[in-house]
Amino acid sequence: MFDLHHDLLKDLREFFHLRSEALQNASALLGGQPGVRCVHALMDDLAIQPRLTRRMERNLTRLHELLTLENVHDPERIEAACFAEIDPNSPIVEDICLLSDEFVHHLRALFTAQEVSSTEPSPA
C-alpha cells in the first residue's frame, strides 16, 4: 500500500532540530525572553503536533517578524531596545541574516506544500 500521509512539517522540524541553538540565541538577542519563549513553544509543538496549528502559525509569524527585524522601529516593543544594543559590525549580524534567510526559505516551502496539499483530492 501507499502511504498517502505526507508530513508537511518534516523539513521545518529538521531545521529547528539542526539550528535550535542558533534560533534560541538569535531570538534572545533580538527579542529577549519573549523571543526565546516563542522558539521554545515552536520546538515543543514541532515535537508533538502532527500538523500545523494556529498557535504554531502565530509563533512562526512572531519568529519571522523577530528575525526580519519587523518591529525594531517601534519604541514600545522590546525588539527596539534589543536591536539598539547590537553592534552593526558584529559578526553575529551576518549569522542572524543567514539564519533569517534559511528560516524564510523553510516557511515558504511549508506554506507552498500546504497549498498544494489542500488542493489535492482526498483519498476515497
Image (spheres, grey):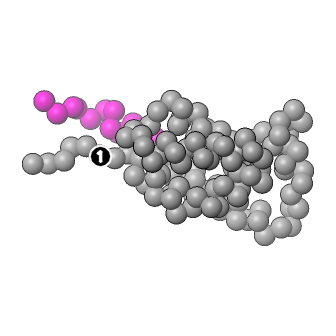
Please provide percent x and percent y for residue 106: 51, 52
Q: Give whichever of 98, 80 is nearer the camera.
A: 80
| Residue 98, percent from left and from top | 65, 62
Q: Quadrant of residue 123?
A: top left
Q: Residue at x 58, y 33 (%)?
A: 58
Find out whether residue 117 is within the magenta segment. Answer: yes
User: Which residue is at 58% across, 50% downward?
Assistant: 104
Q: Secondary structure at mark 1?
A: loop
Q: Residue at x 53, y 48 (%)?
A: 43
* Magenta segment main secondary structure: helix
Screen quadrant of the C terminus: top left
User: What is the magenta range?
Assistant: 111-124
Residue holding disc 1: 6
Query: Can you name the residue that lies furthest to the left here?
Result: 1
Q: Is residue 113 visible?
A: no
Reply yes or no: does residue 79 show up in magenta: no
Is 71 left or right of 114, judged from the image as shown?
right
Q: Position of residue 21 (x, y in %)?
A: 62, 61
